[in-house]
């Protein structure tokens, strides 16, 4: 029976390319594919990084919007890294990887946003009386 | 040279820890001498200490957990008796000692008792249920176990060298900062919990990868046993939540060792941030414990009702629902810290909603029993005790989820009663049910059902007699962690509770007797079939105990309840499936790297606690060197010949054919 | 009915569910991707996938740990206790060089993996060496930054904000250093053992790790340095 051959610890020289892939891995691709990905990723990243630094030094955007713009650029660049360097795609061979990533992002969001929300409320409620009065003026 | 360590670290002036340590050291030495005299060291080293077999590691985890449960229970006895004796009286435990007792009790019970037991059960059962030979990373598994064991050793060493934390099982700052806890107690806690946290994270990664990427042929997600689903959900929570604990304890460690200001009272530190972060871990932690417990019951109810589990898909949905929502409720542990109405409302609602998932599960279990032929064996007794106990505990939890009610009951004995209600009712009952259920699979003989039944009844009655009064005390205004009691009107409840502890002690004795007598009578209790409970999942298709490679050929699954279909077909056709074509198998090599790493982790932790810097650096270097040496090995696996596989499997097939013949004689054929 | 014997609607649904916008990679050799992915009826995955996925899960746990340090920084961003603020300690040119170094090291890391897939030992080692070199530049610059600050009395013991700053940036630096040690070990292993199966598995893991570190750095330089310098 053929299913005995895919005992997981056995080294098979031919990785069945119908299986799914580890993140960042696509063993059947030629080297040129990797280099193209790397070059594209690097180009995008350089542009996004330069834009972020430039925005800080020359504030061409409405002042309070700068942090938001920087965060957007950062998220964009993280996406570039994920797609081009880490090779996370939406193909069926990557479903598990994407789901795990989504779970991780959810947890990070809950911790960071949740903590900021909670701690800001706490610090407002813990503020000494005179500072509260100042805020109300 | 020895940092802060000196002979005065031994508690010469405190009789209780001194005498206890002395006795424990004597017992340990006795065990070591016995093993040496009997020449068991080669066997132990080869078969257990360096083993990467998930079954062996699972058994060792469970053994560690049981021993630590007993230590935690001893702390509990001390606490209940102190409160019963200290009504307008000093009692026998001075406050600085009592504070260490309740801190140790919580830490040990949760992190070194319940967690290892749950991890051990998952380790043992999941690969067998998935039809594979081991977890994804067997050597890593060994590392994880030994790290947990070395951390447990570190906590216990605090009994006779130094002191333990006095802060409670979660060391809130500013009390846990060096200003107010200058001793080594909090440091013992920090290093022990950090090391065991790494061990737990390793198991979490292992099991997530195993469940998602290593299932036997034909076993799609929706054909997995529910225990594997709950193991997956629990380990996803481990991967998501334990890093929070690592980070938070690291921050506290930096505060204590380097004078940083994460959580200090001064210079911009924020003690409330510790509470926030540690409960962002702490709440998922209790779901990490309870989800596998639910999984255990999802195995036991169908087996002992003779019916498939009711509502498989809704169980899966409920499990994943609980997994995700458990990361959104953590503030209910500190409603009273002052985040205000908006924040409290959000978390109050989410905490109430999460009960829906559990409700779905309970209905499914009850409907599983309905219409079935229920057999009241010991695992089923624990399960029914769970249903009753956990429903009440869960209801008190939903009460606590309402912020205004929580303002009255926060940190009172009501809270204490609630969390013991749910943890004991779900996790402890599940552990004992699971130990009884899977013990024959692990060791080849059953446990004595009579002593098991006695243990259950003592535990069940003892639990309610101990903890029901605590609900009353909480509503009456008693806060937790009191070393002396100034209100004589609380006395009757405290006496009843102490009496309940006596009943629980009888339960523990019954459990121990059950084990000892079953070992003595193991030939009479032998499990010949490998399927003592008429099971429905794949682990029951293996002999008891299974061969080290689990399955001679990997099964091919065609539906839910993989083994049930195979069994029914065999009984119908009066024969086993045809003998397969045996192939050689590759199995992972055993390795001492787990034990070695853990040994140096223990040395490192001890050195850091006592400020012996040269020893800490040496231990780190030695651990890293060990890793490099291990990483350099060329052989990772060894081959098991087709003959050996065939021999083991033919023995199994013979035993099963004999059972079929006996069954047909008894008229089991259609 | 299609040639798989299923009704056309089911086959159509499956095509859509697989990849509605064709963003992912087409199956190699033009064959249908097997429906076993995620529904896994095809048995255990190959060891290469198991190792890579396990490490991916570990990386997610590491990201969660970083997010706690991020959260602490966000909460304590204004807790300067009368000491220096972020705007007063940010050195943008140095951060720009650090960022460039780490980004380029990610690039060379990818190239080394391309070389590994082509089973070219020389180029693998060359690019791994470059990766390590750039990583070393990063770490040294960061150490110099910390030394500079400390010599001006700006230490983590000064205030909550500085504690959170040094903690987050320092944690990242510790990870890069550990990655560097790992890199050196990998180079030695490739030198001695060549491209054995488990060496390649470890290189996959190293790749994931190094790229993840750059992703974390994007978060750090944006939130801590750039946004911090604005105030």
Image (cartoon, coloured by chain):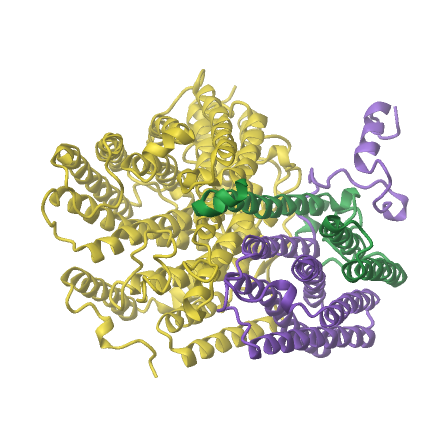
Chain colours: A green, B yellow, C purple
Is B563 placed left or right of B176 in the picture? right
In this view, the residue in front, C229 or B13, is C229
Residue B613 sits in quarter: bottom left
Q: Position of residue C69 (x, y in %)?
A: 56, 57
Q: Which residue lies furthest to the bottom in this view?
A: B1
> Which residue is drawn at the image coordinates 13% and 45% (left, top)?
B86
- Identify the residue at the far front of this view: A137
Q: Is residue B321 visible?
A: yes
Position of residue B666 measured from the top left corner of the image (x, y, whole percent): 42, 24
* Rendered view: C36 above or below B256: above
Residue C109 position within the rendered picture, expressed as x and y whole percent measured from the top left = 77, 67
Q: Residue furthest left?
A: B89
User: In front here: B129 or B179?
Assistant: B179
Picture quadrant of residue A99: top right
Q: Can residue B535 be seen in this view?
A: no
Percent across and percent down for residue B427 are 39, 39
Closer-to-camera residue (B505/B278): B278
Is residue B468 found left or right of C177 in the rendered image? left
Give left or right: position of B390 versus B260.
left
**Depth order, front residue of A14/C189:** C189
Assign the N terminus of chain B to one quadrant of the image: bottom left
Looking at the image, residue C27 lies above or below residue B557: below
């Amino acid at each position: 029976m053929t299913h005995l051959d895919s005992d997981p610890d056995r080294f098979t020289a031919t990785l069945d390319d119908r299986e799914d892939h580890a993140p960042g891995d696509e063993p059947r691709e030629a080297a040129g594919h990797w280099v193209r990905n790397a070059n594209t990723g690097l180009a995008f990243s350089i542009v996004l990084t330069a834009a972020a630094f430039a925005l800080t030094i020359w504030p061409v955007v409405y002042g309070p919007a700068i942090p938001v713009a920087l965060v957007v650029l950062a998220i964009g660049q993280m996406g570039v890294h994920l797609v081009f360097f880490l090779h996370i795609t939406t193909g069926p061979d990557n479903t598990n990887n994407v789901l795990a990533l989504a779970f991780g992002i959810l947890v990070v969001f809950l911790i960071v946003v949740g903590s900021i929300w909670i701690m800001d409320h706490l610090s407002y409620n813990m503020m000494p009386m005179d500072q509260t009065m100042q805020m109300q003026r | 040279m020895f940092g802060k360590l000196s002979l005065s670290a031994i508690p010469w002036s405190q009789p209780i820890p001194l005498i206890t340590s002395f006795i424990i050291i004597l017992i340990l030495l006795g065990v070591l001498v016995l093993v040496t005299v009997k020449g068991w060291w080669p066997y132990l080293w080869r078969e257990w200490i360096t083993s990467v077999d998930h079954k062996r590691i699972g058994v060792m985890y469970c053994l560690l957990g049981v021993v630590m449960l007993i230590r935690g229970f001893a702390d509990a006895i001390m606490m209940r008796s102190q409160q019963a004796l200290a009504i307008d009286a000093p009692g026998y435990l001075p406050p600085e000692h009592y504070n260490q007792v309740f801190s140790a009790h919580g830490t040990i019970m949760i992190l070194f008792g319940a967690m290892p037991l749950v991890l051990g059960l998952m380790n043992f059962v999941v690969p067998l249920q998935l039809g594979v030979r081991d977890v994804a990373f067997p050597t890593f598994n060994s590392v994880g176990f030994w790290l947990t064991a070395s951390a447990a050793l570190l906590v216990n060493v605090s009994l006779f060298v130094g002191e333990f934390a006095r802060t409670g099982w979660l060391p809130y700052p500013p009390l846990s900062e060096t200003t107010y806890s200058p001793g080594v107690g909090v440091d013992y806690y920090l290093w022990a919990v950090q090391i065991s946290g790494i061990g737990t994270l390793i198991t979490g990664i292992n099991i997530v990868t195993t469940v998602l990427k290593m299932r036997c042929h034909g076993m799609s997600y929706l054909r997995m046993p529910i225990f594997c689903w709950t193991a997956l959900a629990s380990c996803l929570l481990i991967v998501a939540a334990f890093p929070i604990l690592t980070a938070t304890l690291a921050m506290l460690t930096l505060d204590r060792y380097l004078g940083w200001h994460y959580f200090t009272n001064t210079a911009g530190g924020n003690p409330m941030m510790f509470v926030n972060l540690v409960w962002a871990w702490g709440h998922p932690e209790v779901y990490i414990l309870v989800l596998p417990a639910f999984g255990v019951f999802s195995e036991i109810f169908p087996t002992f009702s003779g019916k498939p589990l009711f509502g498989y898909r809704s169980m899966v949905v409920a499990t994943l629902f609980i997994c995700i929502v458990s990361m959104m409720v953590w503030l209910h542990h500190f409603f009273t810290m002052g985040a205000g109405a908006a924040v409290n409302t959000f978390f109050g609602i989410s905490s109430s909603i999460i009960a829906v998932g559990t409700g779905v599960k309970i209905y499914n279990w009850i409907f599983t029993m309905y219409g079935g032929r229920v057999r009241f064996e010991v695992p089923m007794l624990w399960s029914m005790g769970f249903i009753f106990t956990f429903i009440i505990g869960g209801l008190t939890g939903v009460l606590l989820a309402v912020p205004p009610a929580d303002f009255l009951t926060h940190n009172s004995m009501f809270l204490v009663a609630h969390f013991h209600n749910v943890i004991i009712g779900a996790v402890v009952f599940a552990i004992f049910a699971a130990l009884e259920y899977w013990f024959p699979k692990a060791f080849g003989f059953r446990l004595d059902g009579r002593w098991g039944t006695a243990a259950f009844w003592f535990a069940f009655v003892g639990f309610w007699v101990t903890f029901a009064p605590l609900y009353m005390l909480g509503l009456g205004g008693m806060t937790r962690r009191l070393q002396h009691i100034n209100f004589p009107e609380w006395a009757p409840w405290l006496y009843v509770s102490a009496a309940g502890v006596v009943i629980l002690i009888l339960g523990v004795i019954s459990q121990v007797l059950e084990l000892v007598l079953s070992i003595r009578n193991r030939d009479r209790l032998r499990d010949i079939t490998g399927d003592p409970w008429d099971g429905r999942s794949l682990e029951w298709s293996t002999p008891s105990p299974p061969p080290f490679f689990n399955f001679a050929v990997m099964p091919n699954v065609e539906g839910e309840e993989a083994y049930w279909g195979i069994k029914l077909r065999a009984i119908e056709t009066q024969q086993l499936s045809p003998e397969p074509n045996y192939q050689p198998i590759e199995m992972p090599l055993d390795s001492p790297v787990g034990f070695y790493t853990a040994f140096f982790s223990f040395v490192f932790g001890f050195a850091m606690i006592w400020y012996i810097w040269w020893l800490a650096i040496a231990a780190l270097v030695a651990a890293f060197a060990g890793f490099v040496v291990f990483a350099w090995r060329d052989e990772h696996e060894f081959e098991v010949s087709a003959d050996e596989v065939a021999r083991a499997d033919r023995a199994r097939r013979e035993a099963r054919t004999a059972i079929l013949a006996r069954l047909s004689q008894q008229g089991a054929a259609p | 009915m299609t040639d798989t014997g299923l009704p056309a609607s089911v086959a159509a649904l499956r095509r859509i569910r697989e990849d509605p916008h064709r963003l992912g990679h087409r199956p190699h050799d033009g064959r249908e991707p097997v429906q076993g992915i995620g529904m896994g009826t095809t048995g255990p995955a190959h060891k290469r996938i198991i190792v890579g996925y396990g490490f991916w899960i570990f990386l997610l746990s590491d990201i969660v740990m970083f997010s706690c340090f991020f959260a602490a920084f966000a909460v304590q961003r204004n807790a300067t206790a009368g000491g220096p603020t972020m705007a007063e300690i940010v050195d943008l040119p140095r951060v720009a060089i650090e960022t460039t170094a780490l980004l380029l090291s990610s690039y060379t890391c990818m190239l080394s993996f391309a070389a590994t897939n082509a089973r070219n030992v020389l180029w693998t080692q060359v690019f791994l060496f470059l990766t390590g070199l750039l990583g070393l530049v990063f770490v040294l610059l960061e150490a110099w930054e910390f030394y500079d600050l400390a010599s001006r009395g700006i230490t983590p013991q000064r205030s909550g904000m500085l504690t959170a700053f040094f903690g987050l940036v320092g944690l990242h630096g510790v990870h890069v250093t550990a990655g560097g040690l790992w890199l050196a070990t990998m180079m030695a292993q490739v030198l001695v053992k060549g491209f054995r199966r488990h060496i390649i598995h470890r290189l996959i893991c190293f790749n994931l790790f190094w790229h993840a570190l750059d992703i974390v750095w994007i978060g750090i330089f944006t939130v801590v340095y750039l946004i911090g310098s604005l105030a």
